[in-house]
């Protein structure tokens, strides 16, 4: 089960997170390829250009019955002065501190470098169990003379591996499994409530403040934050506890307009961001208050709406807006027009920088999820249907009147209702909307998408 693949159920993912194995090394030695080979899915972005993996990526793996969480880190450049690279170094160091076992990856093609030596010194100071993986040894049984120079790093016996073809990964994983602790602090602290976790995808345009929001909530610099649009390229998970309740926060890559998705790495990021919405319980759609609503915001929100997700529209950077007593009202009216296709979604005006109204955001997350997962008994639904049809008669068409016989709830996320009628063609959109509004009013479902499926009685359903 992968944590950052955008696949699988987040409840199970959070419960299984235990032993940590970090993959570290300088840029472009094949860390992400090794990560993908071990986890078995294309989770990490893989590209020939160095520095593609900017943040920690997590994936669940298993070998010989031993489960562990694999961390893929950005390339280490110990002496860099570059802003992004220095923050990547900080993120990798967090992974190193968190890990139970560390795999250092080097490249047989480029040989031993000064940066490799610097990284090895950092790792040796950590005191963690270390393994040395010599990657890109693509020819089976052929050990190049340069292979033996990696013994000079002082990390023990090197493991020759081809992450692309899979050669040598079994021996490496045998060593990983042997080094894993039997129990971890996380396992000791787990309780039955870990299954009760709400997955929240933070989605929106680049530079809307998604990573800043998660960092503010988590109380640490969990995701790289800078004023460079598109800094967060991968979907990242952070588990937090707030007022006794657990949340899995998924920070997604900034989604870009299709015309601007010209690089492969951007293409992968868009797919992963949409997958993050798929695996979430609630989507927080972040709007930049300084920029306002854009067509791209509509498309992002539309994806969540089409998938029936409970959604909250968070207008960020509200602290930077010059306001009077009418500013919020005017903004709300404009949002009501912009988001008319999902009029059920509540708004909250926040500041990820100051923490303004983050408590209100979480209240809305819980409320929208409660409504999105509501189940209503068939008896109560049919009482509502009888009242609704008596209040407003079903329409007629060419002398034939629509008859609604029966209603039942088929599913949740979103609440989905099957309405049996005499003729589907007579069940026009306007009357379906009327029935939907009656359901919302009768059962307090004003903040969730609702799906109505008309069926003709006797069609076998």
Image (cartoon, rainbow, N blue to C red):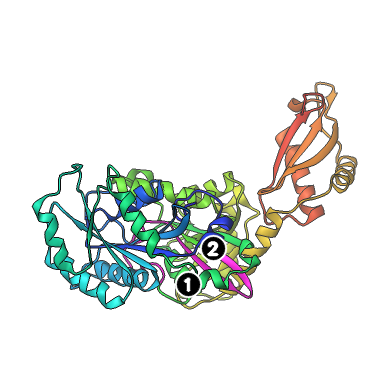
Mark toward the viewer: 2 or 1: 2
- Secondary structure at badge 1 equals loop
Q: Residue at x 71, y 47 (%)?
A: 415
Q: Which residue is mark 1?
A: 352
Query: Which one is in front, 36 or 367?
Result: 36
Percent coordinates x, y for residue 173 in the rendering: 35, 55
Confirm or deny contact between disc 2 and disc 1 (CB under 8 A). Answer: no
Find the distance from the CA under tag 2 to the CA under tag 1: 18 Å
Q: Which residues are magenta?
A: 222-247
Compared to residue 376, the image places residue 101 above or below, namely below
Quadrant for the C terminus in the image: top right
Percent coordinates x, y for residue 40 in the rendering: 40, 46
Q: Which residue is mark 2?
A: 248
Label 1 packing within 10 angstroms: few (<14), some (14-19), many (20+)? many
Q: Residue at x 22, y 49 (%)?
A: 48
Percent coordinates x, y for residue 221 in the rendering: 40, 73
């Amino acid at each position: 089960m992968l944590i950052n693949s955008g696949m699988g159920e987040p409840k199970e993912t959070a419960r299984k997170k235990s032993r940590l194995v970090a993959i570290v090394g300088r840029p472009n030695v094949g860390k992400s390829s090794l990560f993908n080979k071990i986890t078995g899915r294309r989770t990490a972005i893989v590209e020939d250009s160095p520095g593609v993996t900017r943040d920690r990526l997590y994936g669940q793996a298993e070998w010989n019955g031993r489960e562990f969480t694999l961390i893929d880190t950005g390339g280490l450049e110990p002496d860099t002065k570059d802003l992004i690279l220095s923050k990547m170094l900080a993120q990798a160091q967090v992974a190193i501190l968190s890990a139970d076992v560390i795999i250092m990856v080097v490249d047989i093609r480029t040989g031993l470098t000064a940066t490799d030596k610097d990284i090895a010194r950092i790792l040796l100071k950590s005191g963690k169990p270390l393994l040395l993986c010599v990657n890109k040894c693509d020819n089976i049984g052929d050990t190049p003379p340069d292979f033996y120079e990696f013994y000079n790093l002082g990390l023990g016996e090197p493991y020759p591996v081809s992450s692309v073809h899979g050669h040598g990964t079994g021996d490496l994983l045998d060593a990983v499994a042997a080094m894993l602790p039997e129990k971890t602090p996380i396992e000791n602290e787990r309780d039955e409530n870990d299954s009760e976790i709400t997955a929240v995808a933070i989605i929106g345009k680049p530079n809307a403040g998604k990573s800043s929001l998660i960092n503010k909530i988590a109380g640490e610099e969990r995701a790289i934050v800078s004023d460079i649009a598109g800094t967060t390229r991968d979907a990242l998970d952070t588990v937090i506890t707030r007022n006794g309740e657990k949340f899995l926060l998924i920070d997604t890559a900034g989604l870009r307009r299709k015309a601007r998705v010209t690089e492969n790495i951007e293409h992968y990021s868009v797919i992963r961001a949409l997958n993050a919405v798929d695996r979430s319980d609630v989507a927080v759609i972040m709007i930049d208050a300084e920029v306002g609503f854009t067509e791209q915001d509509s498309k992002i929100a539309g994806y969540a709406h089409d998938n029936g997700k409970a959604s909250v529209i968070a207008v960020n950077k509200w602290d930077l807006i010059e306001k009077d007593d009418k500013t919020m009202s005017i903004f709300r009216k404009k949002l009501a027009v912009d988001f008319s296709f999902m009029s059920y979604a509540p708004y909250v005006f926040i500041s990820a920088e100051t923490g303004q109204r983050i408590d209100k955001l979480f209240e809305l997350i819980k409320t929208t999820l409660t409504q999105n997962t509501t189940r209503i008994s068939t008896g109560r639904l049919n009482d509502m249907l009888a009242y609704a049809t008596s209040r407003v008669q079903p329409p007629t068409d060419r002398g034939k009147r629509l008859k609604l016989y029966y209603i039942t709830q088929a599913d949740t996320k979103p609440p989905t209702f099957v309405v049996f009628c005499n003729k589907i063609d007579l069940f026009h959109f306007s009357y379906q909307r009327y029935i939907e509004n009656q359901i919302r009013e009768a059962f307090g479902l004003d903040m969730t998408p609702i799906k109505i499926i008309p069926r003709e009685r006797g069609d076998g359903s």
